[in-house]
């Protein structure tokens, strides 16, 4: 039976029950949205960063209205299973990002001047035109908000497609923000991959996407026809290296928080703990205890730590990786448990894993942390780098030794005895197949525009 691509029928992952169907945007709807954005682009580009920021700030303020914020949080929970308290936090984070993004955009748009040999060259970052923002489902407000703000502040108009897993959340976010903006500056379309492909066929000037390598590759192929600019974050397989002398309580607590938080559905989740053999048993025991202390349950209940996985397909993917690893000799240090009627899975620690296993090589995106035991820091570095991913990494150990290891890791963002959260002004950037282009920071803002040089002769002093 051919699936009906004219509607989306998201499922509540806590109950397994479908939400009411939602009509998908047609090819004509997509064409109209892109055309509206194209017509609105010249005036929006001329407005300047400060004027644009003033209008955007009104929309961001509207997202902070208590009823709106609570409705958005409840929508996140019902569509992707995030515990309600965490969903509220996500909405708050999205609102808090506006001010620093506006400051970075103003700095990025400020022209610079170079002089040499009687020639003065002004370099100014100009808007590209129409940006397509394609959002993920794991942070369905915060992540697309980063890309939408960057695009709008730098003078582009935006056509936004939320994930097909969380379409109503994306609609609610975008429609409320768009109310504060001129007509056509921000439009939203709904659907699966075919709608995303239709956006690219309509000739946008930039695609900003967060999601899988496979979808990112499809976007790159489609973008090649027009050499469309791209900002892609394509997931990770983040290692945590634990060295002798590390604070094992902190390291294990970090691994549990970063590996199991959001049920492991985080692009920079700790998926692999690579631990020196001198401390491997002690670290693993602490991690197992932390995993077993987490409460998995109804995301609407206040004492729930972890909700369900977002979809049945995602749960099945994680379980298949685990079962294949166990069949190949890995050991489950905690119980392998899945239950319904929703898509629940208990946090799991696996050891005795080998580098060749799929669960070591491929993104899991679920509540599983593997433990690999190594004999030296050199072996830890080699294991950590033996992957096509390179988004984030962390190292716990004595400061100088940890810093030396961190400098050898092939990852765009590395934390030393802490997480890799980017400080204000630092880029969010991936290495290898984890990214193409990058966001955040002043330089990240410039990825959402194009530099133009203007040269003129000047009298030499």
Image (tube, helix red, strand yellow):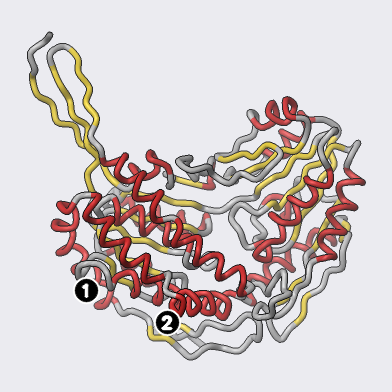
On screen, 414 above or below 183? Answer: above
Seen at 55% across and 39% down, the residue is: 412
Query: Label 2, on which residue?
Result: 5
Looking at the rendering, in which quadrant would you find the C terminus?
top left
Seen at 38% across and 40% down, the residue is: 442
Q: Toward the viewer: 458 or 356? A: 458
Counting the numbered discs, the total is 2
Marks 2 and 1: in contact by CB < 8 Å? no
Give how far across and how far down residue 34 sits, in percent: 24, 67
On residue 2, the disc is none
Query: Label 1, on which residue?
Result: 32
Circle 1 SS class: helix
Give how far across and how far down residue 338 sits, in percent: 77, 75
Compared across the picture, whether 433 is left or right of 450 comes to right
Which numbered disc, 1 or 2, marks the residue that appears first in the sequence?
A: 2
Give how far across and how far down residue 140 sits, in percent: 49, 67
On screen, 12 above or below 382? Answer: below
Label 1 Cα neighbours within 10 Å, binned few <14 / some 14-19 / many ≥20: some
Seen at 82% across and 73% down, the residue is: 337
């Amino acid at each position: 039976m051919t699936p009906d691509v004219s509607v989306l029928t998201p499922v509540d992952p806590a109950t397994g029950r479908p939400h009411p169907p939602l009509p998908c945007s047609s090819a004509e709807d997509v064409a109209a949205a892109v055309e509206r954005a194209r017509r609105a682009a010249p005036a929006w580009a001329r407005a300047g960063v400060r004027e644009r920021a003033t209008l955007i700030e009104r929309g961001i303020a509207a997202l902070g209205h208590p009823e709106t914020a609570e409705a958005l949080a409840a929508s996140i929970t019902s569509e992707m299973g995030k515990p309600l308290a965490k969903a509220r936090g996500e909405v708050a984070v999205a609102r808090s990002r506006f001010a620093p993004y506006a400051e970075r955009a103003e700095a990025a748009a400020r022209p610079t001047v170079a002089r040499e040999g009687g020639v003065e060259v002004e370099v100014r970052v100009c808007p590209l035109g129409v940006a397509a923002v394609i959002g993920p489902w794991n942070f369905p407000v915060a992540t697309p908000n980063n890309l939408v703000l960057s695009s709008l502040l730098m003078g582009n108009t935006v056509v936004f497609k939320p994930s097909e897993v969380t379409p109503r959340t994306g609609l609610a976010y975008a429609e409320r923000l768009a109310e504060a903006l001129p007509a056509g500056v921000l439009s939203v379309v709904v659907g699966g991959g075919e709608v995303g492909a239709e956006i690219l066929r309509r000739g946008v000037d930039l695609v900003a996407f967060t999601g899988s390598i496979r979808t990112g590759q499809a976007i790159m192929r489609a973008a090649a026809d027009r050499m469309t600019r791209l900002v892609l974050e394509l997931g990770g397989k983040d290692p945590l290296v634990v060295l002798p002398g590390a604070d094992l309580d902190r390291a294990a607590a970090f691994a549990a928080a970063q590996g199991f938080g959001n049920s492991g559905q985080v692009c920079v989740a700790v998926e692999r703990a690579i631990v020196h053999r001198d401390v491997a048993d002690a670290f693993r025991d602490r991690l197992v205890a932390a995993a077993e202390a987490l409460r998995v349950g109804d995301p609407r209940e206040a004492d729930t730590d972890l909700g369900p996985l977002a979809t049945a397909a995602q749960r099945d993917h994680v379980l298949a990786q685990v079962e294949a690893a166990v069949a190949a000799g890995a050991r489950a240090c905690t119980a392998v448990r899945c239950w319904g009627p929703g898509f629940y899975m208990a946090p799991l620690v696996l050891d005795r894993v080998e580098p060749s296993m799929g669960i070591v090589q491929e993104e899991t995106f679920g509540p599983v942390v593997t433990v690999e035991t190594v004999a030296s820091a050199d072996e830890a570095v080699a294991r950590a780098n033996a992957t096509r991913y390179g988004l984030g990494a962390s190292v716990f150990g004595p400061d100088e030794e940890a810093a030396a290891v961190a400098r050898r890791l092939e990852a765009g963002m590395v934390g030393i005895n802490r997480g890799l959260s980017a400080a204000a002004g630092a880029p969010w950037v991936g290495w290898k197949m984890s990214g193409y282009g990058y966001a955040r920071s002043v330089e990240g803002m410039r990825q959402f525009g194009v530099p133009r040089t203007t040269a003129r002769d000047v009298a030499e002093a």
